[in-house]
Image (tube, rainbow, N blue to C red):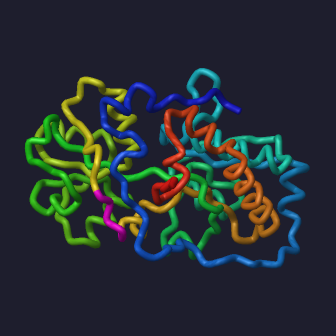
Amino acid sequence: MPTKTRILNSLCAALGLVASAGFQARAAEPYYELPADYAACSDDSYQRAVEHGVKLGVAPAMPWTGVDPTSGKAIGIDVELNAEVLKRMGITKLTYEAGAFNSLIPSLLSKRIDMVVTDVHVTPDRAKTIAFSGPVWWYGPALVVQQGNPKGVKTFEDLSKVRVGVLLGTGPDEYLKKVGVSATRFQNYAEEFAAIQQDKVDAVVEYDLLAADFKKANPDAKVESIASFKMPEDLLKNGYGYARFGLRKDDCSFRTAYNQALAEVRASGAMSDLLKANGLSDRNLFVFPLELK
């Protein structure tokens, strides 16, 4: 396995992105992202993977996945979590192919790669073409504001009163469209975070991990994240569900074995250990916060 990525250790305090803080994400009724899958498998995709190994698709999207420029090895949280599951399956020969995120699903369908390891979220369009692993882990939303929060943004409802920025085509973008919040849309993260520092927008809606990674790389940037807010229940259905990996629908036996191994890795505590090694916590195992009584 690649060296553990360390992404949030010194950062959480500065940003207020402690994984357990603020997110009240459990819906009033259970929400299932995918229907139950009870396929009877007759293919040999799992056996082939054990014998010949698998090629895994990753995008340059740290802290999720990337390629170490010195060693050339794949790195990132998703790389580590996936490798642990494959080890449980008895699959030890792993190769990686890097490409733009929007190229990974086409590569999967053309059998250029065997899995999409840069995590993907369930969307209706994706569900038409690929299969998904079971829930791997979860990361939530961040409301990034100018230092000192001069506009007093405290909730998602406040976004309708301020100038909002978002990355085009992302889950946050889809959510803002759904709820009718006007936003300036950016082509890349650099433009997005530059805009809030240049007072072109008052708030940016992002993933907490990405906001944290930006602040880590730019400690003097005059931005901060709202540490505690109530997450709208319908946000789970619009880009903030579980992080999963992408699989081919035809690879029935491989998918079945993978999901069994994934469940065991989560239950064993190994998943928890890997998350904590990356500065996260058990909060990132579930969409909803656990209540221990």
Q: Nearer the viewer, residue 205 or 53?
A: 205
The residue under the point 39% across, 42% down is 210
Q: Quadrant of the N terminus?
A: top right
Predominant SS along the magenta part: loop
Relative to 134, does residue 72 appear above or below in the rendering? above
Q: Nearer the viewer, residue 24 or 76?
A: 24
Magenta range is 230-234
**Image side of residue 20 versus residue 82, left or right:** left
- Locate residue 173: give its quadrant: bottom left
The residue under the point 48% across, 69% down is 123
Q: How many marks?
A: 0
Q: Nearer the viewer, residue 194 or 213?
A: 213
Residue 114 in sight in this render: no
Residue 280 lies, in percent from the top left, at 50, 38
Residue 256 lies, in percent from the top left, at 77, 65
Q: Any magenta on residue 231?
A: yes
The residue under the point 19% across, 56% down is 184
Residue 143 in sight in this render: yes
The residue under the point 14% across, 41% down is 149
